[in-house]
Amino acid sequence: MIPSLHRPTQVVVETDKIRENIATIQAHLPKKTQTFAVVKANAYGHGAQEVAQAVEDQVDAFCVSNLDEALELRTAGIAQDILILGVVMPDNLRLARAYRITLTVASLEWLDQAQAFAKDLRGLQVHLKVDSGMGRIGFRDAESLNKAMTALEAAGCEVAGIFTHFATADEADVSFFEQQLTRFKTILADLDKLPPLIHSSNSATSLWHADTVFNAVRLGAAMYGINPSGQALDLPYPLEPALSITSELVHVKEVPAGSQVGYGATYVSLFDEVIGTLPIGYADGYTRDMQDFYVLVDGHFCPVVGRVSMDQITIRLPKVYPIGTRVTLLGTDGANQITATDIAAYRQTINYEVLCLLSDRIPRVYR
């Protein structure tokens, strides 16, 4: 999908705020802690290449989800280490090695298949993943990890790190977090030797459990100014959202009481009203369940009336505004603000999803 450059809807990304957020978090971490910037899923909707280029001098490495995301960064000129957090199928091992991309090894079965494709793993760097309770991927005991490290090193592979991921670091109840942390530490204690890098801290862990940091952190949501817990926990220090969404009124009309608006005629005006139309819809990631939410026009909250269409939404205005009037769908206008967390709460989801669903059809503008 190509960006729709010739309509007024756009995502604005302020990269200086991302840099400031990273610096703020780093100031609260133990000295010499390495920082991995997580730019998977198009940098949570912010734009992977642009974000990586903006912060590469601040961080030690990058994390992505899959091989194609890693290749995108390499072809954009990013030279730092790039760790793929997910599983790359063994038949792509040679490609990863050619582009100096660090892979995650999560099972002995994967390693067996990898060695079937390439007995000699010299030049390949990996991190070992421990499943301490998340239940997705990873080794679950020290015995398997020791076997994997022995086999990897015998094949000439560099085992550069070991890591786990916490399932509840963004929740007020820390009991399961502590169980996972204890399990991870127990497994580490039973290993024959430890790789140079040990990391368990995602954004939530870095913010609310900084005392548990090993020697590297993986900053995702927090570096974009997003509260990883949504509304469950207050941020321990201020972070600034880096992304906003703006558009413009493309049509304004006055309708009499009793007028239907939108698919299914689900909205009927109770009074004589002013209705404005915006060029954004569910094809852009402004999902259909946003009916009855609100946007900001001239600092006023204006409700979304009628169903969200694929390409357009309609809003109720307090008065007639001219075509071209700026509208804020996410961000600040005057004294009022709409955050990704506000939208997530309305959708009954998480702020991560709100931003990751923003489609490539909305152009990104960088400041």
Image (tube, helix red, strand yellow):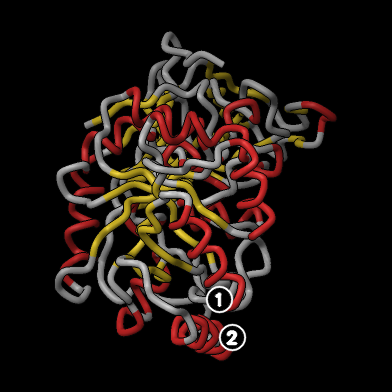
Residue kind at label 1, given as amino acid type:
Thr
In front: 64, or 107? 107
- Based on the displayed image, in which of its 4 quarters is residue 79 positioned? top left
In the rendered image, which residue does mark 1 sit on? Answer: 168
Q: Is residue 303 left or right of residue 338?
A: right
Q: Are marks 1 and 2 in contact (CB under 8 Å)?
A: yes
Picture mark count: 2
Indicate which disc, 1 or 2, sits on the residue closer to the N terminus. 1
Residue occupying image coordinates x 21% and y 37%: 54
* Image quadrant occupied by the N terminus: top right
Secondary structure at numbered mark 2? helix
Percent across and percent down for residue 119 are 55, 42
Label placed on residue 176: 2
Residue kind at label 2, given as amino acid type:
Phe
- In the image, farthest residue toward the right: 264
Q: Residues within 10 Å of mark 2 (few under 14, many from 20)?
A: some
Percent across and percent down for residue 303 are 57, 42
Percent across and percent down for residue 246 are 40, 31
In front: 117, or 181? 117
Q: Is residue 248 left or right of residue 107?
A: left
Percent across and percent down for residue 295 are 49, 41
Q: Residues within 10 Å of mark 1 (few under 14, many from 20)?
A: some
